Image: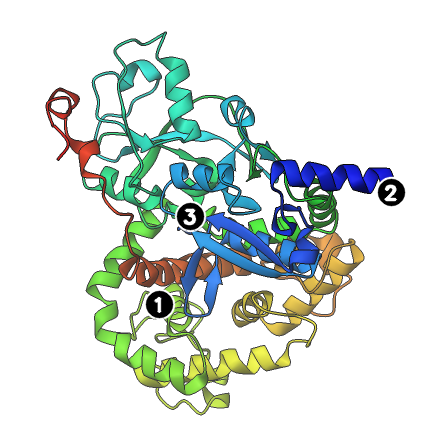
C-alpha cells in the first residue's frame, strides 16, 4: 500500500498534477455544467424564467443527481463542440444528432428522441422533390451540423450541389432567411420543425433527406467525470419507464401537431390586425385575475377569434363564448361587451383552476382547466377515472388527453357518471390554445433575443476572400 502511494506521489511530481486536476464526481462538485443553444426546442427564457425541452431535461437530470444546474448558452455548434473539447462543461444538451463523424471525437448519452431531417422550402416557390432539384440553389445550413454531413455525403453523387455553412446562425435565423427569400432552402430536424412551424406557416417540408437519426447529449471525447455515463444510463431509463420523457415531449411538441398551416396563418394575421384593438384590455384583465395575458388572449382567440359579437348555434356568445347560465353565475350582464366577457371568462377559468385536485400540478393544471372550460368539469373527471382504470396517470395531461376521446364510445361512457361527450373536442381545444399561447410567448422572446454575432467574412465570395489580406 505504501509503495503504491509513493508511486502515485512520484507520478504527480513528474506530471505536475494538482488536487484540482483530480477528477471528481458531479455530486462532489455540487454543480452540473451544461452548454446549450437558444431556441424553442433547446433553451430560452420567458416570463417565468428558463425553459425549453433540453433545459427541462437537464434540470431533471440535475435533480436526479441532487446538484445545481449551470447553463451556458452559445451561439454556434462550433463553439459548443469546442467547449466540450476544452472540458469546460460536463455535457452539451443542444438537440444534437448522433453521427459517425461526431462519434470519432465525442461520447454520447443514451438517445432520447428519434428524428428525421427535412429540406424546407417557401410556399409559392417550386417544391424540390430530390437532392437533384437542389443543384444551383442558395442553401445555407449551420456549420458543424449533421445537415452539413448529409450534404457532404451527397456531394459525390451530385458534384454541382453547393451550399454555404454559417457559424453565426441558429435555427430561427435560418428560418428567417428562408422566409425572407434570402435563401432558397435549408435543412431542419423534424423536432425543430415541429417546434417552429407555427411561427413560419409559409415554410413547408419539401422532402426527407438522409437517414433518420437519434438525438442525445454529447460529452467530451475523453470522459473526465467519474460515474457520469452510468448516471446518464440510469436517468434516461428511469424517465422513459415512468413516462416523464413522454410527458416532456407532449409539453413541448404535441401542441403543434394538430394545428395546420392555414390555422397558423389566420392567427398571425389576427395578431397583426385585430389583437392591437383588445390587447390593453386583455392585459389589464389578466393582471386583475392573475392570468398570463398571452393565455387569456389565446383562449379568447380560440373561442371567438377576438370577435366580441361571436355567436354559436348552441347559444354561447361573446369574446369568451359564455353560456347564459355561466354569464349569470359570473355576474356578467352583457355577453357582447368585450370587457365583461373577458372578465367573466377569466373569473370562470380561475374557478375551474381552484376546483382541480392539489395533486394536479402546473403546467398540467392549466391544460386540465382549459379542457373543463370546454367540455365541463364532470366529463373531465370521467376521463380522469378512465385514465386511472387504464393504468395511466390521472394527474398528467399527456395521459388524460389520450382517454378523453373514449367518452364518445359507449363501451367507456356507459360506466361514467356524466355519460357521453365528444371527447375529441376538448383535446383539440387545449392543443390549439397551447399552440396560440406559445406563438405569442415566443414572439415576445424573439423580440428580445440577441442574435449570434455576425461573421462577416462568411458572406464574402470565396474568390474575393482569397484577395483580402489581414491587417
Residue nearest the observer in this picture, 170 or 441 = 170
How far is disc 2 from disc 3 in space, using C-alphas? 49 Å
Q: Earlier in the sequence, mark 2 or mark 3?
A: 2
Residue beneath label 3, please?
A: 37
Q: Specify whether residue 424 is in view.
A: no
Residue nearest the observer in this picture, 94 or 348 = 94
Q: Secondary structure at mark 1?
A: helix
Residue 344 horizontal/vertical position (percent): 43, 84
> Do the residues bearing badges 2 and 1 touch, measured as CB atoms within 8 Å?
no
Nearest-to-viewer mark from 1 and 3? 3
Specify few, some or many for label 2: CA neighbours under 10 Å numbering under 14, 14-19, or 20 or more.
few
Residue name at image x 40 percent, y 50 percent:
39
Colouring scheme applied when the structure was drawn: rainbow
**From the viewer's perspective, is residue 60 above or below residue 87?**
below
Which residue, as the protein is rendered here, is positioned at the far right? 1
How far is disc 2 from disc 1 in space, using C-alphas? 81 Å
Q: Earlier in the sequence, mark 1 or mark 3?
A: 3
Which dot marks residue 304?
1
Which dot marks residue 2?
2
Specify few, some or many for label 1: CA neighbours under 10 Å numbering under 14, 14-19, or 20 or more.
some
Amino acid at each position: 500500500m505504501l509503495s503504491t502511494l509513493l508511486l502515485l506521489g512520484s507520478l504527480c511530481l513528474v506530471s505536475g498534477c494538482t488536487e484540482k486536476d483530480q477528477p471528481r464526481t458531479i455530486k462532489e462538485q455540487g454543480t452540473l455544467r451544461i452548454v446549450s443553444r437558444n431556441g424553442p426546442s433547446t433553451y430560452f427564457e420567458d416570463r417565468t424564467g428558463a425553459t425549453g425541452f433540453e433545459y427541462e431535461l437537464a434540470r431533471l437530470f440535475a435533480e436526479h443527481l441532487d446538484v445545481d444546474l449551470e447553463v451556458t448558452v452559445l451561439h454556434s455548434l462550433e463553439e459548443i463542440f469546442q467547449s466540450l473539447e476544452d472540458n469546460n462543461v460536463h455535457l452539451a444538451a443542444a438537440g444534437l444528432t448522433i453521427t459517425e463523424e461526431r462519434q470519432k471525437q465525442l461520447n454520447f448519452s443514451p438517445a432520447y428522441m428519434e428524428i428525421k431531417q427535412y429540406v424546407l422550402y417557401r410556399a409559392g416557390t417550386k417544391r424540390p422533390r430530390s437532392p437533384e432539384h437542389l443543384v444551383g440553389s442558395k442553401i445555407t445550413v449551420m456549420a458543424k451540423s449533421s445537415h452539413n454531413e448529409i450534404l457532404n455525403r451527397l456531394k459525390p453523387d451530385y458534384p454541382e450541389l453547393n451550399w454555404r455553412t454559417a457559424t453565426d446562425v441558429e435555427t430561427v435565423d435560418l428560418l428567417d432567411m428562408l422566409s425572407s427569400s434570402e435563401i432558397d432552402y435549408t435543412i431542419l430536424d423534424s423536432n425543430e420543425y415541429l417546434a417552429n412551424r407555427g411561427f413560419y406557416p409559409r415554410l413547408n417540408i419539401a422532402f426527407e433527406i438522409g437517414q433518420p437519426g437519434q438525438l442525445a447529449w454529447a460529452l467530451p471525447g475523453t470522459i473526465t467525470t467519474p460515474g457520469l455515463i452510468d448516471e446518464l444510463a440510469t436517468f434516461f431509463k428511469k424517465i422513459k419507464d415512468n413516462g416523464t420523457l413522454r410527458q416532456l415531449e407532449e409539453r413541448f411538441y404535441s401542441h403543434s401537431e394538430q394545428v395546420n398551416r392555414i390555422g397558423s396563418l389566420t392567427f398571425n394575421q389576427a395578431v397583426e390586425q385585430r389583437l392591437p384593438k383588445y390587447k390593453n384590455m386583455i392585459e389589464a384583465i389578466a393582471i386583475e385575475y392573475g392570468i398570463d395575458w398571452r393565455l387569456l388572449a389565446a383562449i379568447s382567440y380560440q373561442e371567438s377569434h377576438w370577435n366580441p359579437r361571436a355567436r354559436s348555434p348552441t347559444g354561447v356568445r361573446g369574446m369568451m363564448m359564455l353560456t347564459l347560465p355561466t354569464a349569470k353565475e359570473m355576474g356578467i350582464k352583457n355577453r357582447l361587451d368585450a370587457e365583461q366577457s373577458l372578465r367573466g371568462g377569466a373569473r370562470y377559468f380561475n374557478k375551474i383552476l381552484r376546483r382541480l385536485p392539489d395533486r394536479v400540478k402546473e403546467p398540467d393544471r392549466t391544460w386540465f382547466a382549459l379542457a373543463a372550460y370546454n367540455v365541463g368539469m364532470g366529463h373531465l373527471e370521467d376521463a380522469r377515472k378512465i385514465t386511472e382504470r387504464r393504468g395511466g396517470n390521472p394527474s398528467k395531461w399527456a395521459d388524460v388527453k389520450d382517454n378523453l376521446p373514449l367518452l364518445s364510445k359507449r363501451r367507456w361512457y356507459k360506466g361514467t357518471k356524466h355519460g357521453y361527450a365528444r371527447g375529441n373536442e376538448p383535446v383539440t381545444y387545449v392543443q390549439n390554445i397551447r399552440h396560440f399561447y406559445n406563438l405569442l410567448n415566443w414572439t415576445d422572446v424573439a423580440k428580445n433575443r440577441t442574435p449570434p454575432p455576425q461573421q462577416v467574412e462568411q458572406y464574402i465570395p470565396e474568390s474575393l476572400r482569397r484577395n483580402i489580406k489581414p491587417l
